[in-house]
Image (tube, rainbow, N blue to C red):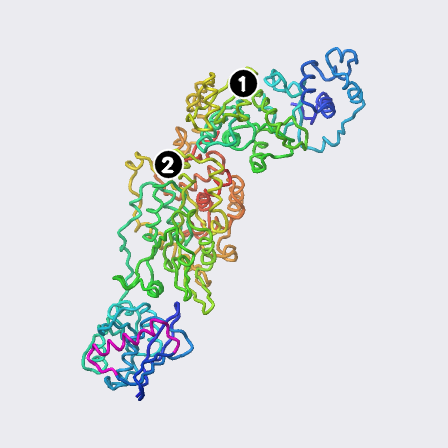
Amino acid sequence: MFARVQSVNFLGLETFGVEVEANIIAGLPAFNIVGLPDTAIKEARERVRAAIENSQFDFPMRKITVNLAPADLKKEGPMFDLPIAIALLKATRQIKNPLEDFCFAGELSLMGKVRPIRGSLLLAEKAKRGDKKFFLLPEANAREAALVDGINIIPVKNLTEAAAYLDGKQEIAPQPSIKIKPLLSDYNINLSEVKGQTLAKRALEIAAAGGHNLLMVGSPGAGKSMLAKRLSTIMPPLTKEQIIDVTKIYSVIGLTNNGHSVIKTRPFRSPHHTISSAGLVGGGSNPKPGEISLSHLGVLFLDELTEFKRDVLEALRQPLEDGKVSISRALRQNTYPANFCLIAAMNPCRCGHYGDKVKQCICTPAELRRYRQKTSGPLLERIDLHVTVNRLTKDELINCQAGEDSDEIRKRVNQAFCIQEKRLRRSAVRTNSQMGVAHLQKYCRLDNPGIEFLSQAIDKLGLSGRSYDKILRISRTIADLAGHENIAIEHLAEALQYRQYERQTIKL
Amino acid sequence: MNDKQLSYKALLWLKVKKFFPQPSVNQWLVENFNAVEDFLNCSKGQLIEKGWPQELISPWQALKCFKVNAKEIQNQDFKAVCIEDEHYPPLLKAIKNPPALLFYKGDFSYLLSKTVSIVGSRRCSLSGIEFTKKIARHLASNGYTVVSGLAYGIDTAAHQGAIEAGTTAAILGCGLNICFPTSNTALFSAVKAKGCLVSEYFWGERPLKHHFPYRNRIISGLSETLIVIEAGEKSGALITAGFALNQGREVLAAPGNPGEIYAKGCNGLIKDGAFLINEIADLEQFFDIKKRAQNNSRKTALNDPILNLLDEEPKSLDQLAGAIKEEAGALLARLTKLEIEQVIAKNEENKFFIKT
């Protein structure tokens, strides 16, 4: 007796179809699964047997062989429990209807309940591409999978229900597909809550508009984290494609199962500084996405930048450049998107009070130099905007008026976003921060007074020649925010304010 | 001032110094002769009478035939001033052992007007640096030339503060072509542009350890007042203070927390009667500085609301943004422009202030 049902599996963000074949022949009772299964799949034998028997079906006391084809690809995860059980029921004629239009994925409990799995969004997409009409999967994953149009998502609670549905004895309504309305005001925080900090707020606006990375230097309690958390509130809402992209990544590591099945707002990730490089960029023998991929299209906030291990920060360099990360292992290579906005925060010195109005700094210049050296180098090279965030005194905190509302700022950011999209539609990059040398020459051309102004500024303000390109990129974004076609001197002049840290370091 | 690189007399002094580089000879000469020509032209008997050692008689005779290679000097970009020149600083001339010949780069005339010397420890605290910058800036903006030694720490801060607002002079312990410490190269050229670099050492002479305490007498000797900020128990700054006291100069010191290593020397000076500087007001009292009276007219002439606001005291960006109803971006752009025009600058607390 033989039966075949269709299932799907994924490695990284890549999916592939798997045919689950069950063959039952005469012989001593046995149950074998072949086709490069991992431990979780091998253990499926016990779960499937218990689930079938506890769901009042008969488990055949003969020699059972289950094959997962293609046989040369490693498969993992417990999502084959349901397809194996269905294949056995079909082979033993306990399910009679043909199953060609169906695809299955789900984990089984010993009582026959269907438990949630990881990656259901990816799997549903693959099932749709495999021309299946129905996709049976755990009820808890249905909402997420319903993001995919063009396939009926059938949520099932347990094995009995699934078998009844397949034989036409019970109706299950397909999960209604989700209409994504980009949520604008889903944030319970607002940039207007931050008092003072004019420079940092403006820098956030520029970072949001042009996708620039930002470094904030300031004493403890100056409001660096508070500012960083509010960056996503002024970024443009995600489009449907972007929502699907982000949700896929969260789905792969199972972060979509608890409550919020679809990631509609821009992610904000703030890993602790003890994180390993595998945790940050992704890793493992079957490489999983790391924090940088989880903050794809959102914000990655590294607080206490100097406390991060050096190799961890070095690992950030390539993804920052490419907007994705490729993790190679002996067996396979996985590529995850990692197009995020990096916000880094650090203290100005070891004791944290250099330049503070409230408390006196107790560091020596040598200590300060050593502290600054910790952050120097290629990573800072990739951070366009540098600002100092000063702690407000008591009086300033009381007297300061509330700033601009996030919604207001987002309107300007949106406008700048559209301008960039239009300008860069023919190229591979999307934002000003990613522009290469060719783009700079094309879109950031300065007039003669502008060139003269900039070279004068670099001399007088002690900037390195290397910051020239960065200033151009920032100015481009500032001009876009103002809706100007060309970069004017005002835009350059403002951009120069965001290179303070470099100026300070040179002075020391 | 003389446009020529070296006056005739300076050339003679150069010749003598090349032949007798020992500091003791320099001291003996300035004590016993008013003019270098007298030394070269006097008789052997007169010389011995004045106490010239017998064994140096033959070198002295050889000196008369010795010729300095003038070309070698002409190719360099320094100038020199000798003790007999009229633009030799009178204050320096009055000390016990003035250098007979000084090499300099930049504008020497600053050292002939109002000067203040500021010295301090190389190992200092950041707050010490901030305070030094503040007072150096204040003094420079009131027309004082700040004299210091281009060392790490307080010296560097004194020069930096002064450059932001006025003029400064650095007295080196090596030849004028060598920047020591090397990390101060940028400051070295800035001082040259905004004041002058001075050294009694020959072109190419290495920064040897014993040069520095010896040149300290010039730092204290060049001005009537010496300000000491953060000096350890045994520091070069205290040596300078010692010179200043012997030279009859006024010593001012900034106090520190007792028990801190940076503070011991300064607190000791105050105990011995040095004038205590705790804040800018003390400085104004001592130097009798009228509060920026002469500058006000210039700034109001510029008629810029930002400058009017900054005129009272340094202000942060938030304070400016609160006072001037303008978009943050436009305000920042205007501030940068003022910074580039060198009208304003930013201090350690990230506040903007007006440069003079």
- Residue extending furthest toward the front: A28
Q: Chain letter of disc 1?
A: B
Q: In the image, what residue type sits under mark 1?
A: Glu
Q: Output the chain of dot 2.
A: B
Q: Which residues are magenta?
A: A35-59
Q: Nearer the viewer, mark 1 or mark 2?
A: 1
- Would you identify the image quadrant in which residue A168 lies? bottom left
The secondary structure type at the circle numbered 2 is helix
Main secondary structure found in the magenta portion: helix
In this figure, which residue is indicated by the disc labeled 2?
A: B320
Left/right placement of residue A319 relative to residue B217 reads left
Q: Is residue A477 above or below residue A92?
A: above
Image position of A220 (left or right of A163): right
Residue wearing tag 1: B224
Residue A57 falls within the magenta-colored stretch: yes
> Label 2 amino acid?
Leu
- Could you say which is closer to the camera, residue B306 or residue B1? B1
Give the quadrant of the N terminus of chain A. bottom left
